[in-house]
Image (cartoon, rainbow, N blue to C red):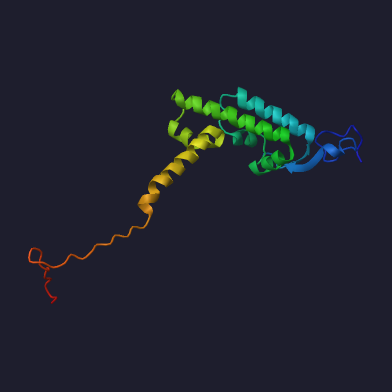
């Protein structure tokens, strides 16, 4: 066991940190392993929120992950383990969504692209998109349903004689 002076980047941890130690992960920028501890995750959550709120170029959560060498799969795994990180990701996603929507309203971003992706960032947009799909399906349903038309045969009469088709008798 290492003592309490073990360097932060060591993969070993002392017994006081054992319960806070999660795992070793690989930084995708350096391909070096680093220990993941609860304290580090909470710091990452604070940095994420700060980045999403204050960096005007923050337009996607993946930008933050990539700058730190973290894959989306790894971040999702950590989100399942840490409510603090999960809440920070949701808050950051909404902050980014607000920035994107405002930029589209002021014609600083392509509104068609923003409109397509906004359901990912905002529940109201998601509800609207789902409602539109439902309305479209309901309006198209009658057109897609099989229709059976029964035409009664008109009786022959002097006014309406039977039509003769060439080649048939």
Q: Which image quarter: residue 168?
A: bottom left
Q: Quadrant of the C terminus?
A: bottom left
For the question of whether residue 61 can be seen, the reply is yes
Say if 129 sits above or below 101 in the image. below
> Which percent across, then down, holds residue 52?
61, 27
Q: Looking at the picture, tell me which residue is in the foreground, 64 or 131.
A: 131
> Which percent across, then down, holds residue 114?
48, 33
**Position of residue 116 in the picture relative to residue 38 (left or right):** left
Q: Looking at the picture, tell me which residue is in the foreground, 123 or 17.
A: 123
Residue projecting furthest to the bottom: 169
Residue ID at (7%, 66%): 158
Residue ID at (29%, 60%): 149
Q: Quadrant of the N terminus?
A: top right
> Which percent across, then down, holds residue 157?
10, 66
> Which percent across, then down, holds residue 33?
76, 42
Residue projecting furthest to the left: 158
**Position of residue 161 in the picture relative to residue 140 (left or right):** left
**Position of residue 65 in the picture relative to residue 1 (left or right):** left
Q: Looking at the picture, tell me which residue is in the foreground, 167 or 98.
A: 167
Q: Looking at the picture, tell me which residue is in the foreground, 2 or 142.
A: 142
Residue ID at (13%, 68%): 156
For the question of whether residue 58 can be seen, the reply is no
Q: Which image quarter: residue 88?
A: top right
Q: How many marks?
A: 0
Say if 59 sits above or below 133 in the image. above
């Amino acid at each position: 066991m290492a003592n309490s002076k073990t360097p932060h980047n060591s993969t070993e941890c002392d017994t006081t940190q054992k319960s806070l130690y999660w795992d070793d992960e690989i930084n995708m920028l350096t391909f070096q392993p680093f220990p993941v501890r609860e304290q580090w995750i909470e710091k990452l959550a604070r940095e994420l929120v700060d980045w999403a709120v204050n960096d005007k170029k923050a337009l996607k959560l993946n930008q933050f992950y990539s700058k730190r060498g973290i894959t989306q799969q790894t971040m999702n795994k950590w989100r399942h383990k840490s409510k603090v990180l999960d809440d920070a990701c949701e808050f950051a996603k909404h902050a980014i969504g607000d920035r994107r929507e405002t930029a589209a309203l002021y014609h600083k971003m392509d509104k068609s692209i923003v409109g397509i992706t906004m359901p990912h960032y905002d529940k109201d947009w998601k509800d609207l998109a789902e409602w539109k799909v439902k309305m479209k399906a309901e309006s198209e349903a009658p057109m897609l349903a099989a229709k059976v038309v029964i035409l009664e045969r008109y009786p022959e009469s002097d006014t309406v004689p039977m039509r003769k088709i060439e080649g048939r008798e």
